[in-house]
Image: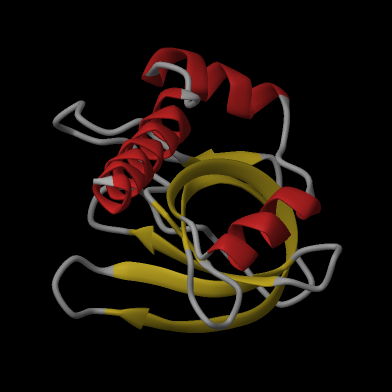
Amino acid sequence: MKNRLIIIAAILLAGFLGVENYNNTPAPANRDAAAQSSHNDDAEFAQAFERRATKLQMAGQGTVAKVLPDDNDGSRHQRFILRLASGQTLLVAHNIDLAPRVAAIQAGDTVEFYGQYEWSEKGGVIHWTHHDPQGRHVGGWLKHNGQTYQ
């Protein structure tokens, strides 16, 4: 009986933490406004990486370390690697079927972003850097040389 209670308590705690993490994200309209006025600091990206977090709406800024070829399998994505001030790298996968391509991007450029963080062994991936035509997902964006791409 005691083991059963411990298992039930663990399941409830895991469910609560998952719901709490999901519910701590503001409603879509508020998330866009919050992201435009502030960025997550690099420590939050480091924590997300350590926890192997997924589906986190995050904003930040980095320097383009490398521009990669487009991914043309399925939805087309413009890809590049950003290096945060902390040294952590993020792969940006920007859907160019739904948003304009970031123009003239090159290594050394600064890019601000708001999108969904997904853990990867190399630091993480940022995607959903565009609007959602069906309105089911909060819209993201990229900012480069004073231009916003969404």
Q: In which quarter of the image is residue 107?
A: bottom right
Towards the viewer: 35 or 147: 35
Q: Is residue 1 left or right of residue 24?
A: left
Q: In which quarter of the image is residue 90?
A: bottom right
Q: Position of residue 98 (x, y in %)?
A: 25, 48
Towards the viewer: 86 or 131: 86
Q: Quadrant of the C terminus?
A: top left
Q: In which quarter of the image is residue 17?
A: top left
Which residue is found at the position 32% from the left and 46% from the top? Answer: 2
Q: Residue furthest right?
A: 85
Q: Can residue 142 be seen in this view?
A: no
Q: Is residue 26 above or below residue 92?
A: above
Q: Is residue 65 above or below residue 105?
A: below
Which residue is found at the position 54% from the left and 74% from the top? Answer: 80
Q: Which residue lies furthest to the front in this view?
A: 1
Q: Is residue 145 above or below residue 38?
A: below
Towards the viewer: 107 or 5: 5
Which residue is found at the position 60% from the left and 29% from the top? Answer: 35
Q: In this view, does 84 lie to the left or right of 22?
A: right
Q: Position of residue 116 (x, y in %)?
A: 44, 48
Q: Is residue 137 visible?
A: yes
